[in-house]
Amino acid sequence: MDKYTVAAIFRGIADVLEIKGENPFRIRAYQRAAQNIESLTEDLSDLMARGELERVPGIGKDLARKIAEILTTGRLRYYEELKKEVPPGLVELLAVPGVGPRTARLLYDQMNVTSIDELERLAREGRLRGLPGIKAKTEENILRGIALVRQGTARRPLGLVLPLVEYVVAYLQERAPVERISPAGSVRRRCETVGDVDILVVSSAPERVMEIFTTMPLVREVMARGGTRASVRTTDGLQVDVRVVERESFGAALCYFTGSKAHNIRIRELAVRKGLKINEYGVFRSDERLAGREEEEVYAAVGLPWIPPELREDRGEIEAAQAGRLPRLVERSDLKGDLHVHSRYSDGSGTLEDIAARARQLGLEWVAVCDHSRSLKVAGGLEVEELLVKLRAVREFNERSPDVKLLCGAEVDIDGRGGLDYSDEILAQLDLVVASIHSGFKQGEAALTARTIAAMENPYVDLIGHPTGRLFGEREAYPLDLTAVLDAAARTGTALEINAYPKRLDLNDVYSRAAAQKGVLLGIGSDAHLVDQMDYLALGLDVARRGWLTARDLLNTMTYAELRSWLSARRARAAR
Ligand code: DGT
Ligand code: CA
Ligand code: CA
Ligand code: ZN
């Protein structure tokens, strides 16, 4: 998992080059390389051993050599030298939109500004104006930029945080004397956005854990460090807290720090009624410790079965647990297919073979290959003739492939009035049809609701893609009458997508649960554009579990044969 170290160093290089006013193409090259490296699923060291680093997009001879140096020595001399050329505080200022390298340099040289906090204070007090090129208006822009940075770094989408959590956990496991380790907090509950990362550890040598954690290459700043607890900020600004707890308290601490706070409060009330006290150290009757090593013991002390972290939001899970009616949440091993993958036929990068190979690695039995339809020109939407070529190619592929089967699908645009981008005659030939809205978001609730329902009323539409259109950090969900949409889905038997692309997670947990309660089927689609992104299926699973879904609520748990018969029943109804 050294890819994050390499990516962090490359990003650092890009920042320094930017301050130095170097060639923008060189800067961009480092940034792009960092991004590509991060999304690799293959181990960098393996690639290096096979001499294949240069096969990663954006990596040439020079960068391959630098990666090799980082992988073998843990550092990069070029970067160490380069860093000496600029003051460290300067790099932080660049994160503020509107503060470019020239302004950052100016602020540093003339005002000694080395942090965003200082910059904010000076701008507030009106002390920047008067510097060359800085007016009252510029100060306002800087303050607005700072607010954006704070907002953007305040909560991040789960999918962008999880790889880093896995990295930190693996890093500590490999290097520190770790007996037990687990993420806690919103990460463990799989909330769709994460404020900060909480990690709990049991160790015989807490100081060692602190030392190793606070000196990780991706640590930018150690915010607090004690004997058993430390907080750091990573190079891209995320806060990570690590706590070392006693072996006997691990379960109690895990309960406490997993939260949610609302869930914890309910559990503690139950304890009080039994004359018990629960805190992060254990379960106590006066001073006697009754339990604490395992979470199960803590729940058992208040007469409950263990509750999956995804449900711990005080949304009825405690009542369900008391009644013995906790849902049997869908699990990764239940998933047999992915409903939404783009291929090279539109804007994806994988061939049919690549997609099937990845599916095989992920233990999937089928994949619906859904490329964009013809009006979505920017995304390489398929003309009818191209679609027919693809259809033949998928049929031929399936004849060759004994295990993984592909479905020839399409992600068909819903137009401004609820019409579809292909005729019914064409749709009827496809194995599976996803219909999505990609334009006209400003139409208002009534029109958007009507468009969505009109698409569901087309008997060839099997699934509505990313039903609310939200994109974290870019676009709010568009206004929809969700009750009407869910009712129409139930009436027409149309499934709704849980789009698992990290910026989407759409439908979300709450709506997925509401849909399932109305008997609507849901389908997870990774919306992968690179085959590596088919891993996003796991994020969709997180949403499904937070939405209380069982295997029976999802299309993804069907075998290929079951899915085909569900689809052909729908087609038969459509033909009537
Ligand atoms: P986040 O970080 O905003 O995404 O959300 P969490 O849930 O990770 O919140 P965080 O990091 O502030 O705290 C982690 C857990 O610790 C939280 O879910 C419950 C527990 N916790 C924190 N503060 C309190 C508190 O004042 N009372 C109780 N009962 N629990 C707390
Ligand atoms: Ca947290
Ligand atoms: Ca925290
Ligand atoms: Zn789409």
Image: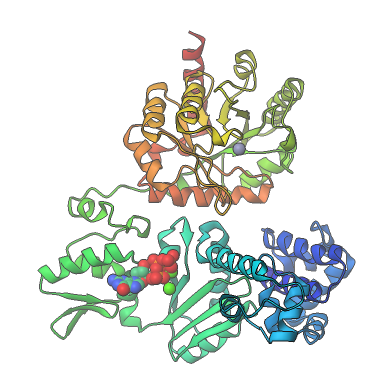
- Compared to residue 145, the image places residue 559 above or below, namely above
- Compared to residue 132, the image places residue 449 above or below, namely above
Q: Is residue 330 visible?
A: no
Q: Is residue 471 visible?
A: yes
The image shows residue 273 at horizontal and vertical percentages of 10, 68
The image shows residue 148 at horizontal and vertical percentages of 57, 63
Residue at 82% over, 59% down: 58
Residue at 41% over, 30% down: 485
Ligand 1's quadrant is bottom left
- Compared to residue 556, the image places residue 207 above or below, namely below
Toward the viewer: 235 or 163? 235
Q: Left or right: where does residue 425 sit relative to residue 229?
A: right
- Please identify the quarter of the rendering in which residue 526 is found: top right
- Please identify the quarter of the rendering in which residue 258 is found: bottom left
Toward the viewer: 481 or 163? 481
Toward the viewer: 542 or 10? 10
The image shows residue 420 at horizontal and vertical percentages of 60, 22
Q: Left or right: where does residue 322 sit relative to residue 211?
A: left
Q: Left or right: where does residue 392 sit relative to residue 230?
A: right
Q: Quarter of the image containing the N terminus? A: bottom right
